[in-house]
Image (cartoon, rainbow, N blue to C red):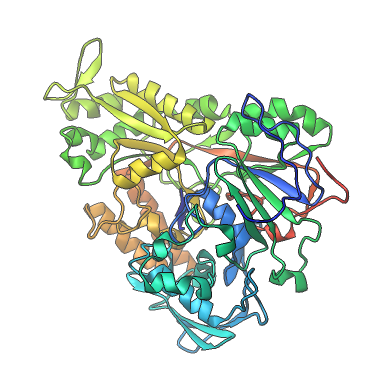
Amino acid sequence: MAGLAIAAGGVLMFTTVMPRGASGALPGAQHAADTIVSSIRAEPRSFNRYVARDLTTIVLTYLTQSALVRVNRATNELEPALAEGWELLPDHRSFRVRLRKGLRFSDGAPFSADDVVFSFQAVGDERTASVLADSVRVGSQPVAISAEDAATVVIRFPSAFGPGLRLLEAVPIYPRHLLKPRLDAGTFRSAWGPSTPPAQMAGLGPFVLRRYDPGQRLVFERNPYYWRRAGARAAQGVNHVVLEVLPDQEAESLALEAGAIDFTQSEIRPSDFGGLKRAIDGGRITLTDLGVSLDGDLFWINLTAAAAKDPRHRWLQHPDFRRIVSHSIDRQAFVDAVYMGAAVPAYGVISPGNREWYVDAPMPAYDLDAAKRLLASLKLTARDGGMLHDADGTPVHFSLLTQKGNTSLERGAAVIRESLARVGVRVDVVALDVGTLMQYVAAGNYDAAYFRLLLTDTDPALNADFWLSSGSAHVWNPSQRTPATSWESEIDRLMDQVVTTLDPERRRALFADVQRTMAREVPALCFAFPRLSFAMSTRIVHATPAPFRPPVLWNPSVIDVRDGSTR
C-alpha cells in the first residue's frame, strides 16, 4: 500500500557470479568479502519510484535514494534522515524542517532545499500521474512545500493531519539538476525507465546502481558521497550489493540453501525448512521469527464500469457473490493447505499483527449452506452435473489471475478454485508473471485477481491510495472520479476523518468503522496472514529484520559482513 506496493555501467564488478544451473538456481558461487548478494523475484518496472510501486523498484529505492525522514521498521518510530530536525510552527499545521548541510548526490552535485521542493512538485504534477500522489495529499489538497533558504524547508498541511511528518518518508528526494528538464517538458513519467543507463541517474542513498543485466541481476556499489559515512555508523565492509533475479521460489530457496545468496526479500515458506535445516544446523543460516505478517494475499473481483459490460456482471459484481466466496472458504483448512499451518486465519484485510489498528470485524464465515442460499437468490441454478448456470444459461465461471512462481499465491488460488467448485462455481486460475498480471489489472481486463499488496506503513492514513475510491491502489475499482457506491462514499468520509483527526483514540475508532464497512461489503477478501520466518546468512551482521517487505534492505546502510567472510 504507498501507500501500497504491488514486490549496465562502465565499472568493473568486484564479484564473480557463476552461471545458473539447469534448475534455474545459482550454484554455490563464491563472492568477494565486500559483497552482499540477495534475490529479487521480478525485474524493476522502473527505476523511478514516483511512477512504480512494485517491490523490486522499492528495494532499488532503499538502496539508492533517501527521504527527509524515515520510519524505523524495527521500532515503528519516526527518525531524521536527510532532515536533521524540525519544529512545529504556531499554526499547528506547518513544520520548519532543517536539512543536513554539505550533502551531495552520488554524482557529486550538492543537495539543497530546491531538490526537496522539486521532488514534491514532480510527485504532484498531473502529467507524472505518480503512484505517490495520494500519499502527499490531505483530502483532495496537496501538502505545500517551500524553501526558506538552501538548508530549510517549510511543510504546510492544508488541514490537521494525523500521521504528521511520517508522510515525508513516502517521497525519496530526486536530483533537480538532472530531472527538472523532464518535468518541464511533461515527460517525467518516462524518466529513469529500466533502459536508462545507470550513469544518467543519481541519488542520496548508500549505494549507486552500476549495472543492470535484464533477466539476470542488478549490481550496486557504495555511494562515495553518502552522508551517513561522516555521522551515524554506516557499514564499512560492504562495497557492493548484487540482486539476482530469481522469479521461481524453488530456485530462490535452493540458492539460499547453497549459500549463493545471503537473504531474500520475503519470508521463507514452511516447505523450505527441511531443505535449510542442514545450513541452519551448520551455522551458515540463522532464522528470525518476525511474528504475524502485516500483509496478506488478497482476493478481489473487478468492479470497474468496463467489467459491467460483461453480461455476467449481474451476478459476478453483485455484493452477494463476494459473500458467497467468503462463505465458501474454510479459513483453517486454507491455513493448513497453503501455509502448512504457519499462518493465522483471516476474516478482514487488516492483520492482527498491526496491533495499533486491527479490530475484530469478521467477514462472512465459512458456511456452505449460506453460500448456496445466496447463489439461489442470484438465480444461479445447477445443471450439467451440479455446475451452476445463470438465468441466461451461461455457466457460472470466472478467471482468477495470480502470480506465477509464488507458492502461497498459486496454492491459495488452487484452494479458492476447489472451494468454489464445491458450490458449483467454476474458477479458471491463470498464473502470470508479475509485470503481465499488473498490466491486465491496470487495464481493467480481468474477472478477479489473487495477489499481495504491500503495506508501506502501519498507519492507514498513509495507505489512502487503497482506501479512498479515488486512490490508484483501490484495486477493485481504482481512481474513481466520484464514489461508485454509497459504502465507498462512506469509507471516503471516514478516511477523511482518519486523516485529519489528531486524537489517536478517535482515529482508531474511525478506522474501526472503516474495517466494519469493508467486512460487510467485502470488496477484498483475505483468508490468512502468514507467520513470518526470515532466513539470512550468518555472514551478515548488523541487519535488523522487520515484518515489512523488504525485511532487511529497508536499512541497507548499516548492513555489514563478518571480517573475512566469503561464500
Q: Is residue 330 above or below residue 36?
A: above
Residue 393: image quadrant is top left
Residue 21: image quadrant is top right
Q: How far across and down, in percent of the image, does residue 87 sit?
A: 57, 84
Residue at the farthest right position: 564
Which of these two is toward me, 300 or 382?
300
227 on left or right of 159: right
Q: How far across and down, in percent of the image, does residue 85 sit?
A: 63, 80
Residue at the farthest front position: 10
Q: Quadrant of the C terminus?
A: top right
Q: Is residue 360 above or below residue 389?
A: below
* Residue drawn at the location 65% of the way across and 80% of the way down: 100
* Residue 534 showing in the rendered view: yes
Which of these two is toward me, 153 or 79?
153
Which of these two is toward me, 102 or 390?
102
* Residue drawn at the location 40% of the way across and 60% of the way down: 464
Which of these two is toward me, 436 or 492?
436
Residue at the farthest top position: 385
Task: Count every numbered label the image shows and give the total.
Answer: 0
Q: How far across and down, in percent of the image, does residue 433 sit?
A: 45, 36
462 on left or right of 41: left
